[in-house]
Amino acid sequence: QVRAITCDNASPNDVVIDVLAERLPDFRGKLDRGRCFDHIVNLCAKSVLKPFDVDKKKADDVRDTAEE
């Protein structure tokens, strides 16, 4: 008996959940899927930090100018 599944947010996992829901009578599909909390936090952190990203070439140029 499968009560719940935790997996990351990759789309192939959505397919697996749908297949399990079809084959297991007590498994409610997306209602019984827990997404990986660490993955969600990582995606949120990347989203928050993205506006502060600096292009590597620009960062190298600034460093080189500062060294001169």
Image: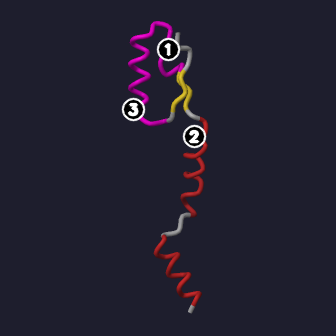
Q: Is residue 55 above or below residue 27?
A: below
Q: Earlier in the sequence, mark 3 or mark 1?
A: 3
Q: Which residues are magenta?
A: 9-32
Amino acid beneath label 1? Arg
Task: Point out the frontmost of discs 3 and 1.
Answer: 3
Residue 38 falls left or right of residue 61: right
Q: CA distance from mark 3 to mark 1?
A: 18 Å
Q: Residues within 10 Å of mark 1 (few under 14, many from 20)?
A: some
In the picture, the disc for residue 12 is 3
Q: Residue 45: horizontal and vertical position, in percent?
A: 60, 50
Decide: few, some or many residues near mark 2? Use Cα within 10 Å; few <14, some 14-19, many ≥20: few
The amino acid type of the residue labelled 3 equals Pro
Q: How many C-alpha atoms fall within 10 Å of the one at disc 3: few (<14), some, or many (≥20)?
A: few
Q: Which residue is mark 2?
A: 40
Mark on residue 28?
A: 1
In front of the other: label 3 or label 2? 3
- Residue, x 48% and y 71% (percent of image)? 56
